[in-house]
Amino acid sequence: MQRVVLHVDLDSFYASLEELRNPGVRGKAIVICVYSGRSADSGAVSTANYKARELGIKAGMPIVFAKRLAKDKDVVFLPNDIEYYRTVSERIMELLEDEADAIEQVSIDEAYLDVTKRSMDSWENAQKIAEEIKGRIKIREGLTCSVGIGPNKLIAKMASEYKKPDGLTVVRDSQVTDFLSNLPVSKIYGIGDKTTEALNSLGIRTARELANFDTVALERVFGRNKARLLQDKAKGIDESPVQQAEAQQISRIGTLKEDTDNLETIVEKLRELAADLSTRIEKEKVVFRTVSIIAIETDLKVQTKSETIQETDDEETLLGTARSLLERFLQENPGKKLRRVGIRVSHLAPKREKKMPEGLDRYFNRADADLTQ
DNA sequence: CGACGTGTAAC
DNA sequence: CCTTTTACACGTCG
């Protein structure tokens, strides 16, 4: 079944929005930061616009590094304002919904669109739809985006990467092999540093080499599933549908003012995070069965601890469970101090509408819970 | 198999 | 000297 899939990626979204609402910074190098609050410049770069990227400033980099690169240059550092970015994002996603047979939002600034039907299987028509989308986003919001078009999500995603910013790249099914052939494996979506290293040590450097590599030998290194996944990617194969997936887990994480192993100090932070998480749980109308804490130590090593309980959506239960997990963690790791701490809920299920008076439901068997839609 | 924990990846 | 959030694969254990 041949498909036509678009990937729409808003160009340096956060930075562009700040330029739009603050004319004073237009045309300058702009760096959007997540400040952690433990010292003046602690935190990381969320987005750098293209002017800032020219200086070597990139997303994920510590703010202090970015400031060093910006030394003596005219660079604007701004704190992020996710609330505002989300508002604009929602408007754009609504606009995209009108342009697609199906849509899948993957992050605040990215979405896949299946346009197979409305393009009538024609790449030319798909390109017209993409131009239409780019025009609308430009007129309505003053923003540019990069669009990739391909026979599946993987190719659409890599096509949108191909030309940025304000790009439009079409990779027809007949062009997939050529598009990928000499691409370094590190540029394949889903292949990161570790996997690139492992592939390189097998002498594999390009997508073509990966696609043609002996499958059995690859399986010995990566296991059957991962090996299959890797070779599919290298061949541009991706059957996953464009559809909004239900959330599997929801989490919140925060940075402590200073490294500590003090129970009450950490619980205070957990309390904040649990409150925030509960708001989201309520908004999503879900219940959860598993609670985890995420402990990030001074050396940034991550450890998790989790417990599965009776299905609930109660904030007190959430915090209580997190607290007991934290107590266990501190007991098992005496002397270890935490830098950051997080809380997560998983095993989510849609919340059922209450049909009987408060509390009465506990007299009934809950074995049918899995059948709820 | 379900629960739990870790690693990898991307944003 | 360092953010945040999510997904998924996989190993291990009982």
Image (cartoon, coloured by chain):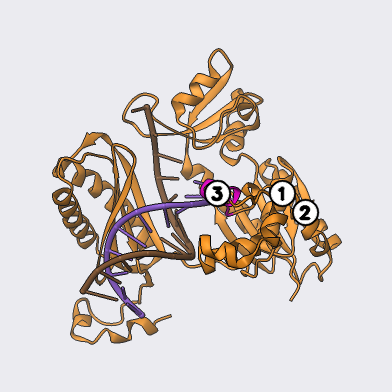
Chain colours: A orange, B purple, C brown
Q: Is residue A32 above or below residue A92?
A: above
Q: Is residue A137 visible?
A: no
Q: Tag 3, which secondary structure?
A: loop
Say yes or no: labels 3 and 1 on the same chain.
yes
Number of labels in the image equals 3
Image spot of residue A177 (x, y percent): 78, 59
- What numbered label is drawn on residue A371? none
Chain at numbered mark 3: A
State the extent of the magenta-drawn residues as a range: A190-201
Q: Nearer the viewer, mark 1 or mark 2?
A: 1
Residue identifier under label 2: A179
User: Counting residues from the N terminus, which is met first, the one under dot 2 or under dot 3?
Assistant: 2
Quadrant holding the N terminus of chain A? bottom right
Q: Is residue A148 visible?
A: yes
Q: Amino acid at mark 1?
A: Leu
* Residue pictured at 47% horizontal, 36% vertical: A80
* Residue pictured at 73% horizontal, 66% vertical: A115
User: Counting residues from the N terminus, which is met first, the one under dot 3 or under dot 1?
Assistant: 1
Residue identifier under label 1: A183
Quarter holding residue A23: top right
Chain at numbered mark 2: A
**A12 displayed left or right of C9:** right
